[in-house]
Image (spheres, grey):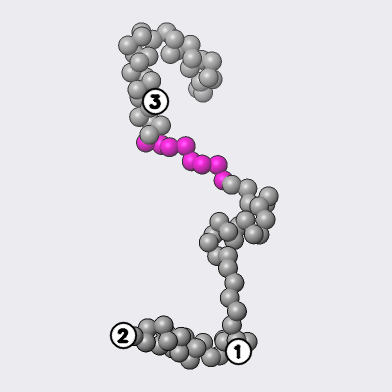
Amino acid sequence: MMSTPEQIQKEIQALPEEAQSLLIDFIEILKKRYPKSPEPKVDAEKSYYQKFKESGLIGFVSVEEDLSTTYKQVLSERLNTKYDHR
């Protein structure tokens, strides 16, 4: 048999004050053990800019057009220039 909130409230009020206090303590323990999961955020209202900004993926770079084929050479040259003092 399912109890309605009203029935539960009547049962609690019928308990002695000490039992009600223990029940409140028990409820606090349960709340800590089973935290309320956050409600999912609705991303539909966010702009693409906001989503990228939150993800940390926003930025730009200016590179050669053929970087996809020369990236190893470019990376090597840039690292050598940057860390040439080692």
Residue 46 in the image: above or below residue 27: below
Q: Which residue is mark 3?
A: 27
Find residue 39 and report its horizontal and vertical position in percent.
Answer: 55, 42
Q: Nearer the viewer, residue 40 or 15?
A: 40
Q: Which residue is mark 1?
A: 66
- Mark 2 vs mark 1: give the one in front: 2
Residue 68 in the image: above or below residue 5: below
- Mark 2 vs mark 3: give the one in front: 2
**How many residues crowd mark 1 within 10 Å: few (<14), some (14–19), many (20+)?**
few
Which mark is first along the chain, 1 or 3? Answer: 3
Q: Nearer the viewer, residue 3 or 52?
A: 52
Q: Amino acid at mark 2?
A: Arg
Which mark is first along the chain, 1 or 2? Answer: 1
Say if the magenta span includes residue 35: yes
Q: Main secondary structure of the magenta part?
A: loop
Q: Which mark is residue 30?
A: none
C-alpha gap between disc 3 and disc 1: 63 Å
User: Circles 2 and 3: CB distance less than 8 Å?
Assistant: no
For image coordinates 38% across by 31% down, the residue present is 30
Q: Amino acid at mark 3?
A: Ile
Q: Amino acid at mark 1?
A: Asp
Span colored in magenta: 33-40
For image coordinates 36% across by 9% down, the residue present is 17
Residue 85 in the image: above or below residue 30: below
Q: Which mark is residue 86?
A: 2
For image coordinates 35% across by 24% down, the residue present is 26
User: Circles 3 and 1: CB distance less than 8 Å?
Assistant: no
Q: Nearer the viewer, residue 10 or 77?
A: 77
Residue 9 visible, this angle = yes
Question: Is 82 placed left or right of 66 in the picture?
Answer: left
